[in-house]
Image (cartoon, rainbow, N blue to C red):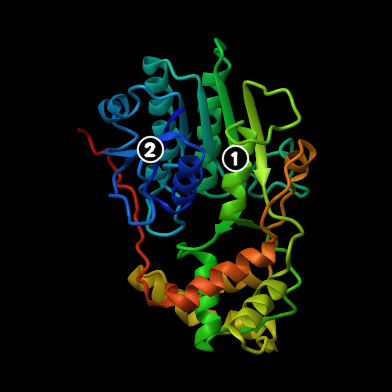
Amino acid sequence: MKILITGGSGFIAEYFHRDLSALGHDLVTIDLIDPTPNTPSANSTYIKGDIRDPKALDKAMVGVDMVVNLAAAHHDFGIEHDTYYSVNEQGSQQVCDAMDRAGIKQVVYYSTVATYGDAPPPHFETSPTKPNSPYGGSKLKGETVFNNWANQGDGRSALIIRPTVTFGVHNFANMYSLIRQIDSGKYARFGPGTNIKSLSYVENIVDATLFLAGLNEDKPNRDIEPFEIFNFIDKPDLTSTEISDHVSKCLGKKPALALPYTIGMLLGFPFDIIIKLTGKNLPISTSRVKKMFRSETKFEADKLLSVGYTPKVPLKDGIDRMTKWYMESGKKENAQWHQPPADAVMS
């Protein structure tokens, strides 16, 4: 098959390039960011473009059989409210319109568990959604766009993946920050840390997506519906303490001492003021302390497991792999944060 990956220069796209190329598929990438040495593959074509630009999409979709839509506004800092909706909702509509012009019937859309927001647990695919952020809200709107597209029939198929926090080699987000803090000796644990923090290891989520889309040798035990939603979470879940303790073990360090939660909040308060005055994204704040050591982000993956998928890499092994990469080279690399422009970049 010939497969288009939107946002194809990003972190998760790297593993789609690797695995789809190994399976013999031809790839096309559309992204505003040039591919890194990790993302291009021998049988891929790169088109510089914005998913909000119909002309760029038409060029990218020539001869394509399937689209994997990874392009998104997703960072939780430094993006305006309307930009989330411009990329995640309106960009999704442009993708659907371009697929219709090109006669493409199959799409995978990466959404997020942030669509559940403040809805009470448990968080299954059939649970209520109540997003509490423009990221979660805009991704839910994007799901609606693909639902409406798929319901037009004529063989259309939309597979929606809702992952939780995703980590792995070459990722510089949450897990990288945790590893770096523990390695530097600046990490402190506040409170018992018994709150669940559901995680997704990148090699597993990509493998699961290929499984559900019928792109690898294994086939899911289900009748494929025109519109389907699957959570992705690696099980069993780990608590925040179990995660940090395992990272410490991988780094050859002792587990961090537990300090009272109130101390963490008091330490974070001055940084809240600095963040408000400067607009800088600092590594400590009261919201970060609360998010890490008090709030619980627990989601369920029963539906995925029920159709016969088994993750290939145990969750702790994924942490091992990322920590090893960090020690060998990752700690010397500079994180590159790419945020979409507020307005579409037109051809």
Q: Is residue 131 among what the camera can see?
A: no
Q: Quadrant of the C terminus?
A: top left
Q: Position of residue 46 (x, y in %)?
A: 29, 40
Which dot marks residue 192?
A: none
Dot 2 corresponds to which residue? 86
Label 1 neighbour load within 10 Å: few <14, some 14-19, many 20+: many
Instruction: Name the amino acid, label 2.
Output: Ser
Seen at 54% across and 13% down, the residue is 152
Q: Position of residue 307 (x, y in %)?
A: 76, 35
Residue 62 position (above or below residue 331): above
Seen at 73% across and 23% down, the residue is 223
Name of the residue lying farthest toward the left: 347
Q: Horizontally, is 247 left or right of 304 in the view?
A: left
Q: Horizontally, is 126 left or right of 151 in the view?
A: right
Dot 1 corresponds to which residue? 209
Label 2 neighbour load within 10 Å: few <14, some 14-19, many 20+: many
Instruction: Name the amino acid, label 1.
Output: Thr
Residue 5 position (above or below residue 181): above
Counting residues from the start of the chain, the first of labels 1 and 2 encountered is 2
